[in-house]
Amino acid sequence: MANNNYAATLHDLERFEEAKSLFQKSIPVAQRVLGDSNALTHRMKWNYAKALYKDDGATLDDLHEALTTLEETARLARRVLGSAHPLTKDIEAELPKSRAALRARGTPPGSA
C-alpha cells in the first residue's frame, strides 16, 4: 500500500486536497484487500480524517465527515486492537482536535 505513504507525505506537506483525493481512492482498496479490521486501514482512515479537518478550506461537510470517520475508526480500533494500542491512542487523541475544528466553525458536533 505505497499509496498510504504517498498520501501521508502529502498530508505532512499540507497538500490536503491531493492527500484527500488519494485517500478516497486508496481506502476502499485497503478495505477490500485487507479488511476493515486491519491496522493499515485504520491508519489510512485516521490520516484521511486529519486531511479533511486540517485543511483551511474545509467545508462543514468535510469537518463532519472527519469527526464521523474518527469516531468510527476509534471505535473499531478499540475493538480490534484494544484501547492500549498506540494506534488506537493516536486516533482517539485526534477526536478532540476534530471536534474543536468543528466548534470553531460555530457548529457543535451532531447539530447539523
Image (cartoon, helix red, strand yellow):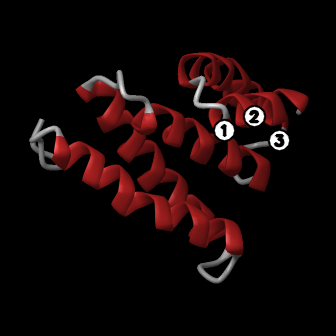
* One can see residue 30 in this view: yes
Q: Is residue 44 above or below residue 99?
A: above
Mark 2 — residue?
A: 9
* One can see residue 75 in this view: no
Mark-to-mark CA distance, 3 and 1? 24 Å
Amino acid under label 2?
Thr
Mark sitting earlier along the chain (3/1): 1
Task: Give the residue at x 45% y 32%.
Answer: 52
Mark 1 — residue?
A: 12
Mark 3 — residue?
A: 34
Indicate which label's residue lies in the foreground, 3 or 1: 1
In the rendered image, the quadrant that contains the C terminus is top left
Residue at the far right in the pictured view:
2
In the rendering, at what x and y percent does residue 95 appear? 40, 59
Amino acid under label 1?
Asp
Mark 2 Cα shell of 10 Å, populated few (<14), some (14-19), many (≥20) = some
**64 sits to left or right of 29:** left
Indicate which label's residue lies in the foreground, 3 or 2: 2
Task: Give the residue at x 29% y 46%.
Answer: 101
Amino acid under label 3?
Leu
> For numbered disc 2, what is the local secondary structure?
helix
Task: Give the residue at x 66% y 38%.
Answer: 12
Mark 1 Cα shell of 10 Å, populated few (<14), some (14-19), many (≥20) = few
Whether label 2 touches label 1, CB < 8 Å: yes
In the rendering, at what x and y percent does residue 72 appear? 47, 52
In the rendering, at what x and y percent does residue 1 appear? 88, 33
> For numbered disc 3, what is the local secondary structure?
loop
Mark-to-mark CA distance, 2 and 1? 5 Å
